[in-house]
Amino acid sequence: MHTNLFPVVPAQAGTHNTVPLESWLWIPAFAGMTWKVFWFAASLAATFASPSISHAQTSTYPQRPIRLIVGFTPGGSTDLVGRMLGARLSERLGQQVVIDNRPGASGIIAAELVSKAQPDGYTVLISGSSISAVGSLYKNVKFDVQRDLEPLALVATSAYIMVAHPSINVKSVQEMIAYAKARPGKISWGASVPGTVQHLSGEMFKRLAGIDMVFIPYKGTGAMMPDVLGGRLQIAIDNILVLTSHVKLGALTALAVTTAKRSPLLPDVPSIAESGFPGFDTAGWFSMYTTPKTPPAIVQKLNAEILAVVNTSEMRERLLTLGATPLPGTPDDLRRKLASEVPAWRKVITDAGLKAD
């Protein structure tokens, strides 16, 4: 038997979203052009091109806009980091980096789109740490991140945080456990989309605490937030990047961070480990990929430009302000990270009997 991760409430319906870069900080408006018109115009010359990539194309890369795929709805931590990077990469590369939100199946839809794209460096993926777990969670999906994507770079790492809506009047992990145990199966909780590390962190916590709460799946943090802030979800676990502002405003109550150590962003908030669960330690991390068989010269150029952006004082300060720690890494660094994370989460999923359709 396995645990059904989607017990009662269906995921919110929705289609993929493309959000103009000009609607986010740091990003200049692009002459009022819609994304579809912009992308069509930019890509028209390549429509009838040969699938092979010439040396000239490699040496002059990029010659047209780059599509940066995000596997979640706008407003979440992966989307936010992607937009920050995209804006600066546009400046460095001399070509627009266009954000394309493709939510669904815990990021697998976006990852598969990139894995099957033309291997020319014009389709890039930014992902959260869930990419190391989803291949083991979805029983009908054959996606394998170590096989189906070309690593580009590690970007940053950040803590997750468990929050409660003020309406349930709990101030600590132990108070939340007592509240949930008095109401088995009646507390709703969310963690962005199914299969993310924040979701799996919550499942681990539930098992350790011996509590029964109903998981509500969404297509991303942006889709989840109205229900969290409105009190329709009593508990949530998500990235500290997107929840801290709501905690500071008093709209949500911070209970604990998932990392072993407290976050400098919220130093008064304890860790789950120091709240009665020693050894509990999970974190989010952001990484970038492109299509397999992309020429090594393009992979190297993209890595160099991504790391150059991450290492700027402006980007580092921005990430730290949001609660993320810069973690610039090479393609080989990312391969080693995946080699460690994929089997670790596979074991968690297998031991817990978790599966999703």
Image (cartoon, grey):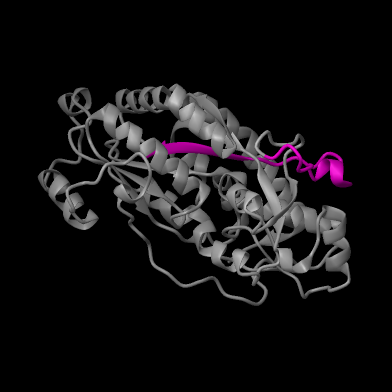
157 displayed left or right of 59: right
Q: Measuring 27% from the left and 42% from the top, which residue is drawn there?
A: 28
Q: How many marks?
A: 0
30 displayed left or right of 266: left
325 displayed left or right of 121: right
Nearer-the-camera pick, 199 or 228: 228
Q: Is residue 169 visible in the rendered structure shown here?
A: yes
For residue 151, above or below residue 304: below
Q: Measuring 16% from the left and 56% from the top, which residue is drawn there?
A: 37
- Prevailing SS of the magenta stretch: loop
- Is residue 252 found inside the magenta-colored segment of the image? no
Q: Is residue 338 visible in the rendered structure shown here?
A: no
Location of residue 300 (image quadrant): top left
Location of residue 289 (image quadrant): top left
- Is residue 271 found inside the magenta-colored segment of the image? yes
Q: Measuring 73% from the left and 57% from the top, which residue is drawn there?
A: 203
State the image coordinates of residue 122 (x, y, percent, origin top left).
Answer: 27, 39
For residue 102, above or below residue 341: below
State the image coordinates of residue 7 (x, y, percent, origin top left).
Answer: 67, 74
Quarter of the figure that contains the N terminus: bottom right
State the image coordinates of residue 176 (x, y, percent, origin top left).
Answer: 82, 60
State the image coordinates of residue 172 (x, y, percent, origin top left).
Answer: 82, 53
Quarter of the figure that contains the C terminus: bottom right
Give, as a single range, the part of the protein colored magenta.
266-291
Q: Measuring 64% from the left and 38% from the top, which residue is drawn there?
A: 341
